[in-house]
Structures are given as C-alpha cells and as structure tokens.
Amino acid sequence: MLLPIALVMAAAFQWGLAGGLAGQLMTSGWSPELLTFWRLLVGLLCMLAWVAVIRLQGYSLNLTRPLVAWSALAGLGVTGNLTFYFISISEASVAVAVTLMYSAPVMVYFVSFARGTERPTTLKLGAIAAIVVGVVLLTGLYRTTPGAFSLWGVLAGLLSGISYSVFIFAFKSAGSHGRTPVSLTVAFMAAVLALAFLVDPAQAVSVPLSPDAPLFLLFGLIGAGLSFLCYFIGLRGVLPTMAAVVAMIEPVTATLYGVIGLGEALSLAEVLGMIIILSSVTALTVMSHRESVR
C-alpha cells in the first residue's frame, strides 16, 4: 500500500515542479503554447517507449474506434488544461493558476447537479460556497483597486480546470476500451498535432539548440513522462479518494516553487484562500467517493 501512495505522491510532486519550471521558462520569453507543445511531445516519446515495452511482452494494442475517439478528446482536454494553466501563471501567479485548476471538481458538481447524477446536499453546497470564498481571497476579487487582480489570469485558471475535467471524463471512458499507455499515447499524439498549428514553427525548432534545452527536457520528463508513469501505476493500488488527497501535493509544491524559485509573494489572504479551496475540494472528493461505494 505504501509504494502505490508513494508513486502517486511522486507524480503530484513532479507536476508541481513542472508548474514552477513553466513559470521560469516563460520569464525567458517562451510562450505558453510552446511550453505545452514540448511538454506533451516529450511525454509522447515516453508513452511510445512504454507501448514498445508492452508490445515486447506480447500484449496487443487493441486500437478500436471508441478508444481512439475518447483518447483524442482526452488529448484536447490536456491541451486546453496545460495551455490555459501556463497562461494563468504568466498573467497571475503559479499559486493562483494551480489552485484554480484544482477547483475543477466544483464545475463537475454543477454539471452533475444539472443532469441529476449527483444529489445536492447541505454539506456539498457548503463546501462549494467555501470554495467560492477561497477563490475570492486567493485572486483578490474583494479589492476595489483597479488592476489589483488579473481577470484574464483568473479566467485562464478556471478554463484550465474545465479542460482538466474534460480530460478526466474522456480518459475514464477511453480506459474501458483499452490499455492505459495506448490511450495516453493517442491522447498525447492528438494534443501534439493540435498544438502544432498554434505554435511558432521557428521558435519550436529553436528549442533543442537553445540554452534552455536541458530545462525543456526536464520539464517534459517530470511534467508528462515519468509523472504519468508513476501516477497510473500507483493508481492501481490506491483508492480514488486517497489519490485525490495525495495529489494536493501538486499545488503546494508549485506554490512553494513560485515563492522560493520565482520570488512570488503571498499575502495572508491568499494563503488562507488556498487552504480553504484545497481542503474543500478534498472534502467534496471524499464525500462523492463515499456515496459511490454505498
């Protein structure tokens, strides 16, 4: 039990570091779209290596139409998730971006309430209200001074969360039609192809020859390669509730990187907002899981 938890924890830690590295690379002039492209390209190469190992073990890939369709949708979700996440980092801060991204379960709940698949309770509505308060504190919406917060940075963070939800839903659907590494390979391939039309070709080609090339490689490995390998292997031996709680290491790690590595300052209100959001999201996840196993 300890090894699966450690693997999920390692994945969340790597994702947090990747968020900090993204902020560092953007200060060097690299665009959010380019960062997403290279992160997923390195991840794709890692997934292809994983699939090659599976083939050597004699397993079939089983590339069915439903698997490809759901995986491609998951890839588009990943594209939106990471691109908007990096835009939010550039417009606001690492802390705001990663915390708003983790507010995705709230959006899922509203959709579930509307569809009737989730029953609204006093505790759930209270947790959602607490998250709203946390967002207000974290983003500085309570301030009346013009320019006190970045509206585009906040919207990008929320859009990142919505895209994250699309990825989770689509990937879960793809999982019922094939193996995890195959699904991730198709997802990353779809994402890289979509981003190829959004990035500047000259800038994309210049990355391997730039002084930041080693940082890009590290960024891709921990952001979409080794981290996904750790996460999905660990997920086999961990309850979803436990995985959701352990994954909260990511926003903490990303925030600490932003404060220590990038010199970002956090006020008491922002820290309080982060704590409220992360604890409330965890509570919602736990409540939902307990209801599903009844």
Image: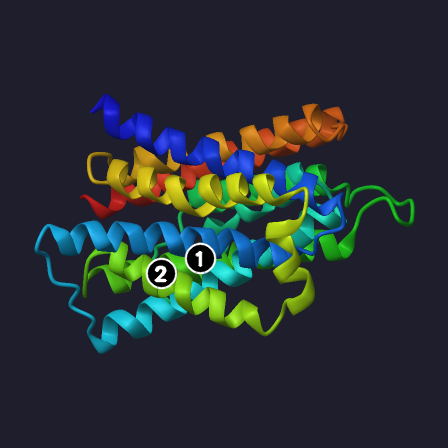
Give the left or right position of residue 203, taking residue 290 as reference.
Answer: right
Query: Residue at the location (39% across, 30% down)?
Result: 10
Q: What's the residue type where badge 2 is placed?
A: Phe
Q: Residues within 10 Å of mark 2 (few under 14, many from 20)?
A: some
Q: What's the residue type where badge 1 is placed?
A: Ser
Residues at circles 2 and 1 in contact by the CB criterion of under 8 Å: yes
Q: Which residue is mark 1?
A: 165
* Residue 119 sits in quarter: bottom left
Name the residue nearer the viewer: 190 or 94: 190
Q: Which residue is mark 2?
A: 169
Q: CA distance from mark 2 to mark 1?
A: 6 Å
Q: For the residue labelled by badge 1, is the local secondary structure a helix, a strand or a loop? A: helix
Query: Residue at the location (43% across, 55% down)?
Result: 109
Residue sitting at the far bottom: 65
- Image quadrant in which the C terminus is located: top left
Q: Position of residue 141 (x, y in %)?
A: 77, 45
